[in-house]
Image: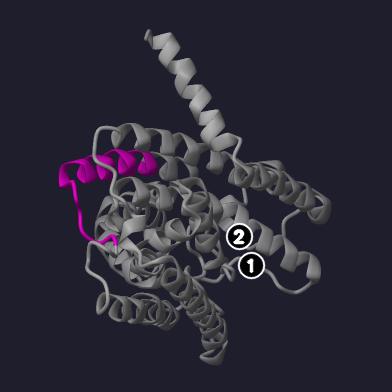
Amino acid sequence: MTAAQWQVSWAGRFIHNVLLRPAVLVAAILWIVANVVVLLLANGRLPFDRPALASMSFAQQVALPSLGLVEVSLLMTVVYALTSRRVIPDIAARAPERSQAARETAALLGYAGLGQIGGWLLGPALGYRSFSFHIAGTLVGCSTPPSIGEVWTWAIYNFIVFAVVPYAWFRRRYSATQLNLQSTDRRNDLLVIGVVGVIEVLVEVFTFPGIFKMSVRTFLVAAPFTLGVFSIGTVLPTMVLIYAILVPRYLKLTGSTVTTVMLGGLTYAAMHFVEGWSVFTTSRNVALSLIFVVLGYFGPGMIKTFLTLRTGNAWVHAIGYHAFAPHVMVDAPLMAKVFGLN
């Protein structure tokens, strides 16, 4: 088979096995509908407090999630190529039989929902803002940075509720391998982490160039601090809850890699329903806030799922596509400001 014939064959398989799947077609239609709804509701202006995007036009801000989805799709292609010669772990086999997997999935999603509600209530009760998997100011900045107490409350609450408790419960019943926490091919995992990490660092600093306004000394002080705070507050909770526990069960229940990737994206978005920039003052603002949460986090959730499925190692996405990029590279200025590290 010539190179041209192989490319045509590969493209045909990709279109048939991925793009023409009913779930993908439905998702594409809903994505278009969501963007149309945004145009109708926003009337040329978004109500969000996102200083990092303030210089962008309305059209650019609306287009940003779709551009992000394109980048995620290209990154999936890179990951597929990097993992094409390794033995792909059977993630579904790591989950229990279907009825048990269904019970565990329903119970964990219910628990996660209650945990989210707890964060929405705890913040205001302590005089802070409601929070979910991100603290106010994450990635896009905010007019009023969080206080030190707000940051630690968010981080510790998320770490205990979404990482420690689920891990303790499931680790008593399943091995580290069954929870996607042990590598089966360290060399390939490191390769994927390195390549994906470099690509994502370049994408993030181009999109959010805030670190270039920091001195080298301030960044070197803030970077490890940012890594620690965000690892506790969102990286480890995300990894344990979704990619160690839920993803194998999604694959077991659906039998479809494509559907599992999309469910991982939706779950990741759902864990960010209340962002620091969200506005819930009117029904219009509520709708815009929720739509942008889904548009903004669906793609990143999908690539995290894809990385986990291709490597069988949830640490790969945590290191290569979460802890350092975006959080260290984008949120170091925020942490420097909050903790007075300038």
> Which quarter of the image is occupied by the N terminus?
top left
**Majority secondary structure of the magenta segment?**
helix
Residue topped by disc 1: 278
Residue topped by disc 2: 293
User: Which one is earlier in the sequence, the residue at label 2 or at label 1?
Assistant: 1
**Stretch of the chain drawn in magenta:** 180-201
Q: Quadrant of residue 82?
A: top left
Q: Is residue 182 left or right of residue 314?
A: left
| CB within 8 Å, label 2 to label 1 | yes
Please tell me whether mark 2 sits on a helix, a strand or a loop: helix
- Amino acid at pointer 2: Val
Residue situated in front as seen by the camera: 325 or 12: 12
Tell me which residue sits at (55%, 42%) in the image. Answer: 69
Tell me which residue sits at (43%, 59%) in the image. Answer: 252
In this figure, what is the number of numbered marks? Answer: 2
Please tell me whether mark 1 sits on a helix, a strand or a loop: loop
Q: Quadrant of residue 24?
A: top right
- Amino acid at pointer 1: Ser
Measure the C-alpha gap from mark 2 to mark 1: 9 Å
Is the residue 212 above or below the residue 110 in the image?
Answer: above
Image spot of residue 233 (x, y percent):
38, 72
Image spot of residue 105 (x, y percent):
47, 71
Tell me the number on the disc at residue 221.
none
Tell me which residue sits at (33%, 72%) in the image. Answer: 232
Image spot of residue 326 (x, y percent):
40, 52
